[in-house]
Image (tube, rainbow, N blue to C red):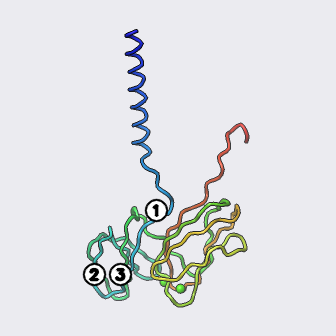
Amino acid sequence: MKKSLVFANVVIILALTAALLILSVNGPSVNASSSLPTVQFLGEGPGTYNTILEEFIVGRGNGVYDLVPGSSYSAASGERVWGVSGANNVPPTAYSQAEHDLDPVVKDCVVDYVGIDDDVDGVRNSFWVGGDRVELITEGMTFEGSFVIPNDSTQFRLAVGEINYIALWYTPCTESVYLPLIFK
Ligand SMILES: [Ca+2]
Ligand SMILES: [Ca+2]
C-alpha cells in the first residue's frame, strides 16, 4: 500500500513537472498582428529627434531604411526619422514603384501589415490576389491595416505606385494545410 502511494506521488510530481516544462517552452500565445512593430513618425531632417520607443528607423533615400539605436538621433537634411519598437533587428522591406510578387497565400488567412513613408500625394499602393485588389493602403508617413485572403493563390502582389519608396512589414500567409503522410 505504501509503495503504491509513493509511486502515485512520483507520477503526479513527474506529470506536474512535465506540464510546467511545456508551459515554459511555449510561453503565452501571441497573435499575428501584435507581433508586428509599433512605429511613430518623428520628422524630416535636419533636426534632432528623441523617442521613448526602442530605436529609430532612418530613411536615407533611395529605399534605404536603417535601424539606429535610441534614444536620440541627429538627422541630416532630407533624412526621415521614425521611432520603432518590436522590430527584432529586422528593418521594414523597401518597395520601389513596381509590381512586387510576394509569397503564395492560402484562403481565409489574415494578412496584417505596418508600414512607413507612403507620401500623402494621392499616389496609392495596394495588395492584389490574382486579378482582384484586396486592399487599398491608406496613405501616411505611417500606415497599417489587415485583410482576408479570399482564395489560395500563387499570385499575391504588392502594387506600388509611390515614386520614392514605401517600406513595410507584413505577416505571411504561406502555411499549407497539414496532411498526415498516410494521405499523401
Ligand atoms: Ca515615400
Ligand atoms: Ca503615396
- Rendered residue at 41%/65% (across/down): 87
**The disc label shown at residue 104, or none:** none
* Category of crowding for the residue at label 3, using alpha-carbon neighbours closer than 10 angstroms: few (below 14), some (14–19), many (at least 20): some
Can you identify the residue that label 2 sits on?
Answer: 74
Q: Position of residue 50 (x, y in %)?
A: 28, 77
Point out the image quarter for the N terminus.
Answer: top left
Mark 3 or 2: the one toward you: 3
Q: Secondary structure at mark 1?
A: helix
Q: Position of residue 165 (x, y in %)?
A: 51, 81
Quadrant of the rendered image containing residue 128: bottom right
Disc 2 and disc 1 in contact, CB within 8 angstroms: no
Amino acid residing under circle 2:
Ser
The front one of 153 and 7 is: 7
Quadrant of the rendered image containing residue 65: bottom left
Which of pointers 3 and 2 lies earlier in the amino acid sequence?
Answer: 3
Q: Position of residue 160 (x, y in %)?
A: 59, 80
Can you identify the residue that label 3 sits on?
Answer: 42
Can you identify the residue that label 1 sits on?
Answer: 34
Which of pointers 1 and 3 lies earlier in the amino acid sequence?
Answer: 1
Amino acid residing under circle 3:
Leu
